[in-house]
Image (cartoon, helix red, strand yellow):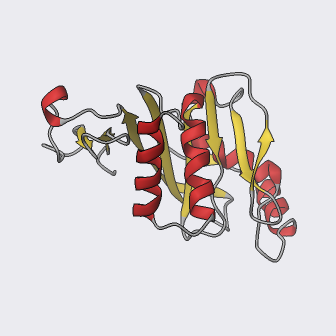
Amino acid sequence: MKNIISLFTLFLFFISCTGQEIPNKDYQIKTAVLAAPENQRAEATILGFNGDGQVVTLREGTNDFVCLADDPDKEGFSVAAYHKSLEPYMARGRELKAQGLSFKEVFDKREEEVKAGTLVMPDKATLYVTTGDPNEETGEIDNLYTRYVIYIPYATEESTGMSLSPPAPGAPWIMDPGTHRAHIMINPPKK
């Protein structure tokens, strides 16, 4: 599936970049929603990046979805969308990472906080992650690919009957079993 971004929007992206190459608000919104189901895009809350590279709300939404724009400090194009019940968990992860904590330290700290009840982790919620290749000539995001994550905290192979690795291409499997971050992974085969 391809999403065409007008050349004008792409032009605005390039002329509005700062020294940190932060895309303009319109470009961030148009690309952030690529991760959300089509029927959720128009009303989703959009988080993006300001000129200082900080996560800010670009658009307040009216539905249950939050979309996160591509991080200009990371290589490659990747946007995400998730149920709003995950936002406290996601925001805490961004906060801890900004403090310089490693992936494992962030994982451990959130595990501790979820167990203590100081960080809310929903009993189930979905995350969509979409990657692709920006095409500077056409203004399209080519090769869109979406993988799916369904958080089910503390679930295990035994409690779900789900394998710890994909039993077949595109089949669901459970990752991080027995932790606050236990989730079902679905990685559809790439075309």
Q: Is residue 140 above or below residue 20?
A: above
Give the image location of residue 103, x and y in percent: 44, 63
Q: Is residue 59 above or below residue 134?
A: above
User: Where on the picture, by quarter, is residue 58?
Assistant: top right
Name the foreground residue: 64 vs 31. 64
Q: Tally the marks.
A: 0
Q: Position of residue 143 (x, y in %)?
A: 47, 55
Would residue 18 be visible to someone looking at this image? Answer: yes
Q: Quadrant of residue 64?
A: top right
Residue 118 location (% of width, % of height): 54, 37
Question: Depth check: 19 or 16 in front?
Answer: 19
Horizontal side, residue 135 vs residue 108: left or right? right
Of residues 145 and 137, the one nearer the viewer is: 145
Q: Is residue 165 left or right of residue 6?
A: left
Rendered location of residue 71, percent (x, y): 63, 61
| Above-or-below relation of 132 to 117 | below
Q: Residue at x 60, y 37 (%)?
A: 87
| Residue 179 shown left or right of residue 90 in the figure | left
For the point 14% across and 39% down, which residue is it?
Answer: 163
Look at 80% across and 54% down and name the residue there.
9
Kindly give the residue lying farthest to the bottom in the view shown.
19
Q: Which residue shows up at 63% across the image and 35% down it? A: 66
Left or right of 25 in this view: 84: left
**Would residue 134 be visible to someone looking at this image?**
no
